[in-house]
Amino acid sequence: MPKFIATDYKVTINGTNFSTSLASVELPIEVETQDTTAFGATFRTAIAGLQTGSITLEFHQDFGAGAIDTILYPLLGTNATVTVRPAGTATSATNPAFTGTYLVTQYSPFNSTIGDLATLSVTWPLNGALTRATV
């Protein structure tokens, strides 16, 4: 997949497809650094430490049966498996699937101003490893 416009991300939470209810997704992955600088050095040195990650999702809120609120609210305080792919097509070398278990630490059912689209945004920490599948 060459350069592309983000129009067809596929995002599932515990197997439920939320793609048509999302306005944005962010999946930062970071590596901690551990300082290895010794006496006498004039520049710092470091090695890679543990990896960490999170996911931020911005939803168009929906209180209908089987919709956003009825699925996300009960997840608060539990783990949820989230998979993100850049396109709605099958997982492949050019459409990798990033899957992780996230601790659902927040849920805000209301985050809107009068006259605005009802939205909600969540950021959940990765709870374990993130996998990148290409098959």
Image (tube, rainbow, N blue to C red):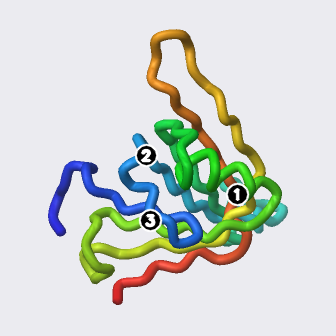
Residue that lies at the very extreme toward the bottom in this rendered image: 135
Q: Amino acid at mark 3?
A: Val
Q: Which residue is mark 2?
A: 22
Determine which of the numbered discs, if any, sits on residue 16 in the image: none
Crowd class of label 1 (few under 14; some 14 to 19; many from 20; radius 10 Å): some
Q: Amino acid at mark 2?
A: Leu
Where residue 24 appears, as percent x and y from the top left, is: 43, 44
Q: CA distance from mark 2 to mark 1?
A: 19 Å
Q: Nearer the viewer, mark 2 or mark 1?
A: 2
Q: Nearer the viewer, residue 128 or 75?
A: 75
Crowd class of label 2 (few under 14; some 14 to 19; many from 20; radius 10 Å): some
Where residue 60 appears, as percent x and y from the top left, is: 47, 37
Name which residue lies at 62% across and 45% down. 69
Which quadrant of the rendered structure holds the C terminus? bottom left
Q: Disc 2 or 3, which lies upstream in sequence? A: 2
Q: Are marks 3 and 1 in contact (CB under 8 Å)?
A: no
Q: CA distance from mark 3 to mark 1?
A: 15 Å
Name which residue lies at 46% across and 78% down. 132
Q: Which residue is mark 3?
A: 84
Helix, strand or loop at mark 3: strand
Q: Is residue 37 visible?
A: no
Q: Amino acid at mark 1?
A: Pro
Where residue 98 appears, as percent x and y from the top left, is: 47, 72
Name which residue lies at 32% across and 63% down. 86
Helix, strand or loop at mark 1: strand
Q: Which residue is mark 1?
A: 125
| Horizontal side of residue 101 vs 120, given as left or right | right
Q: CA distance from mark 2 to mark 3?
A: 12 Å
Res. 128 image quadrant: bottom right
| Horizontal side of residue 81 vs 41, given as left or right | left
